[in-house]
Image (spheres, rainbow, N blue to C red):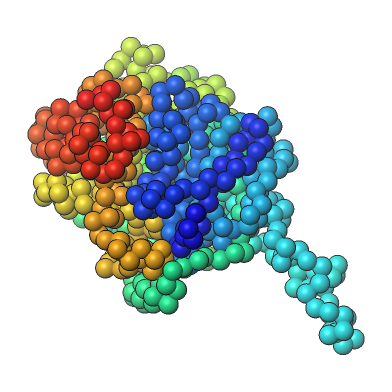
Amino acid sequence: MADLFGMTGKIARVDLTSGTVTVIEPPEEVYRKFLGGSALGVYYLFKEGIVSPDVDPLGPDNMLQFLIGPITGAGPNARSVTVTKSAYNFISIATSGGQAAAELKFAGWDGIQIVGKASKPVYIAVIDDVVEIRDASHVWGKGVEEVELILKKEVLAETESREAMMRDADLTPEWAALRPVKRKGLGEKRLASVWSIGPGGENQVWYANVITEGARAHGRYGPGAIMGSKNLKAVVIRGTKGHKLADKAKFLELVNAIHASEKNDYFWRSYGTAGIGARSAYVEDAYPIRNWQWCAWADPQVKAIEGAFMDTASFVHKQACPNCLLKCLTTVEITSEDPLMDGTITDMPDWEAMGMVGGNLGYFEMPGKTPSDPFTGTHIDQAENLAKLQFTTALHDNYGLDFIDGGALLALLMELRQRELITPEDLDGIDLKWGDVHAVDEMLKKIVYRQGIGDVLARGTWETAKYFAEKKGNPEIMNYSMTAHRYGQPAHDVRSPADKNAMEYVTVRRPSEHTGGGGAGFKQGDWAAAIAGQNNKCATDSMVSCSFPGGHFAGKTVDLIKAATGWTDFTEEDLFNIGAREYALCRLFDIHTQGLTDPKEQWDKLVPHRWFYDPLPTGPQKGAVAYEGNPDKLFNEALPAYWKERGWTEDKGIPTLETLKALGIDDIAGEIAKQHL
């Protein structure tokens, strides 16, 4: 293979059943078509046959991939992405921040693909070119924070553990007296990065995450469950080889320009996504409250817990991903009168947690009051409410669970209790009511360890609603499942015209994707603009970089790729087509692996009943519903027009053979498309 720049040209294929490691070398043509990250991962799901309905998501034949892109390493705002078939049997693409992404590039790899199943708990250790499968029995059952601390000590590069960093001849007696014990020179460092699962992943809770640095997560669609099904506790990486760039000077010039722009970004540098709350509640009317029954409170002075309040009450230390100046994650220490929560160290939390396990679980109201009532408490009461939110976030992180679907699940159960559609006996005696953090703590333990009703709840929100609807003989229960395509809706609503458009959630490549791009295009009915935004987001996830600083990358993305790879003929159209390929493949994946014969009815229409039939009760958008309460307009007019613009069939949304050929993916997807056209 010719020398590659940006990429290393190597992916480690680890077979846990046989205990072997092989090297996959993607041709340059494949990199040009898919770049890396999410698009490359979806390509391999087709190439390796994981798209087949016969591949059990929780069986040994499924493949879990950790992937990065050509600018990951020396580039700004690095992320990693996992790509697999989810336990729900649809596509799983989940991105995460943290140092691990850059560490993998510095070790000389563009990704790790894991197949098979180990006979006992193991972890994968990567030190540059050496990839080993090691025993993990000593960390099995532990939370992600403890696991990371332990495993970072066990994976050391040569420069971190050598015996002497100075010659004896260089030392005066005075210096010798100060020399560290065991002749370790400057001492053993702990520079490895860890992707790990908690007990939730070990026990194959369907919405389990893969976590790094305690709180950064590959956090949607359950890659942690797939990892647990393989008896894989962690992947630990230490790299020392650097990042080979085609035009280092140009690349660093672009990085410096991005950094200069990021320095002026007050919003992100101050509070990260924790600064969204007030706008969401009092401008957008889109803050999830009590399972989306409300989206704004009566009292704007105290109800929307914001970054500024969190900062005063609990912020300790800001953190950043490699080469990022936004520092959107903050460590916090919880101070509470409740010994359950007091002294807990966790993260800020971000907006999705603020909404999904904060307002959505009724943590911000006074006891006995509703969100429509004025707040009668003090700032101390607000701090206690914040503590509940932060503690519930910490539980999800340490157990390794997605708090988006997790919050949707708990809120579903609370509303079913509120409406007396289920009883405490249905929940093993737990009376799960709004704002009760102790009941949430108790219920999460049941879910994580799949005890009693927890074994049902571990399958997520939609499956839980289906279970209770069948058990109670009451199909109305499905109306309270706030899920799109069988996965929890994130903390952005579609009823308010000031927030999301319903078509975004219906058309994105992965269920309920809130960062899918194309927002303005959807609101204007401009399908070409919407598709361009979606394709650009796929390109971002294939580079792989963060979408939050996207504005700071404006006009620089293609040049970054050129400088990294040396592809001087690479264009905006090439970037667009990477996203078009990924969207076509994701659509076919979900249709084929689930065996859908009528995708519109069986898949596209699986969205919350509340969107169309429960008008917003308060706030600036009072009375609003999605698509004016007319789902036919969405599914029978807008959706076919969008499909046509993509070059898919207007009746089922199947990419046509002509479209697949134009995108150069008919070789891996053509036969599958023929089965569904």
Q: Is residue 671 positioned above or below 10 on the image?
A: above
Q: How many marks?
A: 0
Residue farthest to the right, as pictured: 173
Along the viewing direction, whichever of 200 and 79 lies nearer the viewer: 79
Q: Is residue 535 visible?
A: no
Along the viewing direction, whichever of 656 and 313 lies nearer the viewer: 656
In which quadrant is the C terminus drawn? top left
Q: Is residue 320 positioned above or below 129 on the image?
A: below
Question: What residue is rendered at 23% in x and 21% in y?
Answer: 598
Left or right of residue 575, residue 350 in this image? right
Residue 415 in the image: state x and y as whole percent. Answer: 34, 30
Residue 469 in the image: state x and y as whole percent. Answer: 34, 17
Question: What residue is rendered at 31% in x and 40% in y?
Answer: 665
Q: Is residue 524 visible?
A: yes
Residue 230 in the image: state x and y as whole percent. Answer: 59, 33
Left or right of residue 30, residue 504 in this image? left
Question: What residue is rendered at 46% in x and 48% in y?
Answer: 26
Q: Is residue 353 positioned above or below 632 on the image?
A: below
Question: What residue is rendered at 84% in x and 70% in y?
Answer: 183
Q: Is residue 646 positioned above or below 160 on the image?
A: above
Residue farthest to the front, as pictured: 1
